[in-house]
Amino acid sequence: MKIMLLLTKFGIFAMVLCLLFPASSVYGHGLGIDTISSIDVQGKEISITVEMPMYLENEQEQITITATEKETKENVKNITFLIGLFHYNEMIFRNYFFTDNGVLPIKISSKQGFDNFVIHGEQDSILGAWHGTESNPIEITGPLFTSSGLYTFEIEVRTIDEPTNIIENSGIYYADLSVIETTSYIQKDAENQDVEFSLKSYFDKISNFEYDSEAKQIIFEIPFDWSEKQMSHVSVVHVEVHFPKDFTEFLTPSYSGNANGIDLFKSSVTIDDYTEEDERIVHFVLLQDHLRFLKNEIKEPGEPLPEKIVFTLSTEEKLELPLVAYTKSEDFKVNLSWDPVEIEPGTNTNFVFTIRDGQTSEPLRNSDYTFVIIQNGKEIYRTSGIAQIGGDFEKFTFAEDQTGPMIIKFENIRNTGQETEFGIVVAPEFGTVALIILIISITAVIFVTRRNSFRFSI
């Protein structure tokens, strides 16, 4: 019976090997780092990377701009940049900067209340470009990055190889980075009680947030430029929606996403109950291919494109099994299903799982594990075993008083100390376990994305 049950569940696993979420790395367009991948300068192909903190929390931070030859992978020598910095189409500064080794560090000190900025460092006599020394590094002080949102670096190459090799008309290139914005909103639930939502944007400012308790729906907007010049170097748009885990009105097995009236890819909306102890996070992640799809869908003949993306997040009761969670190291992933699908207190439940290699998805034979169920921070069940063929199952019957949020945890996987978790909410007033959601670290989301960014359809 045990083998037959496992074979049945493996059939389900074969249909859905894993739930793969295309999210960007924490580096990428509108995030901590952006790369202009290909620039031709006098027959030499180079790339330019711009990096800065996503949170400007210290009195002094640093921007780092690096130019690399694509063929040799070595840094470009004696390069001068003409750099302009823009925020919402307003220029903050534009000036020349020089580095002899291809790496340009610029210290920044943001000062509120200043009308202008001041540059410290050394200047050369050719273009008046600023460069730094060990005792006198480049530092810009003034009204820089004093608000969150998207910042655009406009970059031209003016010298390369030799300080006197001045280049005209090398082209203008753009890199976008964001200072992360976190905003909070108090909204009314169906019982007219206050609920606090917070949104974190890794792309641009959020506006017009609204929660509709009747429709169980969240709506908000971010500005967006659909022009090809902008979209050509947009790699990802990423926004997080945070709300309390005990806000059961909006807890659901899954969510559907919509942008400007167009249904998003299933993989564009992911649940994260792992990062914050008391909050559920729902990630909107739109990759460049997704954005191009949206642009084609919303484009109307003879009509201008909207200057924003309007996001809609809606509850969705349909539950797709198995669920998948990764360990933080991404070495292992666990598929989880259960039978019967509707879990009721007093009914014996089979939790069927497979322990897999995090990279190849192959089942890992003879896998040690400890299976734990936690209610309100206290263990209500713990057992250990060995999944001899990579898959196994554990039985448990919830008592009548075992209701509310639960955690199913797999500990010490393959005797490595690594673990991962799933969450369930036992809600007998609805007659079933109404909710079960994937709990996954954002680093695991990142890893899976790089290989599977377009596997799911709408």
Image (cartoon, rainbow, N blue to C red):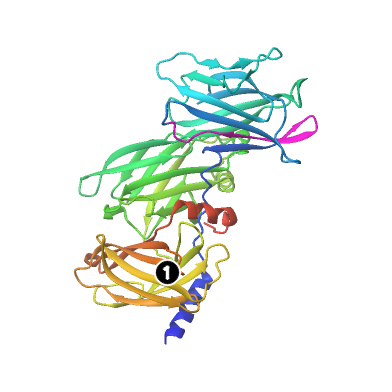
The image shows a total of numbered marks equal to: 1
Question: Residue 413 vs residue 50: left or right?
Answer: left
Question: Residue 402 vs residue 241: left or right?
Answer: left
Residue 94's place in the image compared with 454, above or below, is above
Q: Few, some or many C-alpha atoms within 10 Å of disc 1 (few <14, some 14-19, many ≥20)?
A: many
Q: Nearer the viewer, residue 386 or 94?
A: 386
Quick one: which residue is furthest to the bottom in this view? 1
**Location of residue 50 in the rendering, given as x and y in whole percent from the top left corner:** 59, 33
Name the residue at 49% across, 57% down. Answer: 329
**Location of residue 8 in the rendering, given as x and y in whole percent from the top left corner:** 47, 80
Q: Which residue is mark 1?
A: 336
The answer to whether one can see residue 313 in this image is: yes
The secondary structure that dominates the magenta segment is strand
Instruction: Specify the segment rendered in magenta.
Output: 39-56
Q: Amino acid at mark 1?
A: Leu
Residue 182's place in the image compared with 93, above or below, is below
State the SS at label 1. strand
The answer to whether one can see residue 322 in this image is: no
Question: Residue 188 vs residue 36: left or right?
Answer: left
Residue 133's place in the image compared with 45, above or below, is above
Question: Residue 178 vs residue 344: left or right?
Answer: right
Name the residue at 58% across, 53% down. Answer: 450
- Is residue 283 a member of the stretch shown in magenta? no
Q: Nearer the viewer, residue 373 or 213?
A: 373
